[in-house]
Image (cartoon, rainbow, N blue to C red):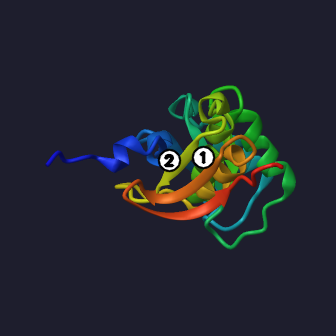
Amino acid sequence: MELVNKVAQSGLLTFDLEDLYPAPGTILSFDLKDHLFKGLILREKDFREALGSTDWSVYKDKVVAVHCSADAIIPNWAWMLVAANLEPVAQQVVMGTPQQALVRFYELAIQQVPVNTYVDQRVVIKGCSDKEVPAEAYLAITNHLRPVVKSIMYGEPCSTVPVYKKKESA
């Protein structure tokens, strides 16, 4: 009796969000707390001096999460000053925590995924990964692929959860 791999014959395409995961060191944090007087108070002159002495080259081609871990009042212009310094060197500047920057990284990476490979295909969004893929990435890939695919499933090709199936037109 011949063994048949039904999973291989199923015609399913697997999309692994872990493949889009940024390389280690891609996402860096810029904490405004480190540039505040006593870590709590934003004094314009001191803040500008601190930014002026910052080595911005460490952020070259990185995704930078700009946030303040101190319970301090940060005026809007301070965020703008940081962005004005990071924009020329960073790949992307995100206001928020490194986790929020990871979510934004995924959203932008998924927008770049060409959908032509997935037109009228049955797609499994891989569920298990070694890295912690944010839930927002699963939502984003579903939104990105749903308009063109025949179906979307979640999990592994041998055990999937149906997510979407295109209605057959009459």
Residue occupying the far left of the picture = 1
Q: How far is disc 1 from disc 2 in space, using C-alphas?
A: 9 Å
Q: Which residue in the protein does label 2 denote?
A: 17
N-term mark: 1 or 2: 2
Say above or below: 118 vs 157.
Answer: above
Q: Position of residue 72 (x, y in %)?
A: 72, 69
SS label for mark 2? helix
41 horizontally vs 18: left or right = right
Q: Are marks 1 and 2 in contact (CB under 8 Å)?
A: yes
Q: Residue at x 71, y 32 (%)?
A: 87
Tell me if residue 76 comes above or below residue 119 in the rendering.
below
Q: Residue at x 66, y 61 (%)?
A: 68
Left or right: residue 43 compared with residue 11: right
Closest to the observer: 125 or 72? 125
Look at the image and tell me whether residue 34 can be seen.
no
Q: Say which mark, if any, is on residue 106.
A: 1
Displayed quadrant of residue 155: bottom left
Instruction: Name the foreground residue: 157 vs 105.
Output: 157
Residue 72, compared with residue 37, is above or below; it is below
Whether residue 112 is visible to the viewer of this picture, yes or no, is yes
- Residue 24 picture quarter: top left
Q: Amino acid at mark 1?
A: Tyr
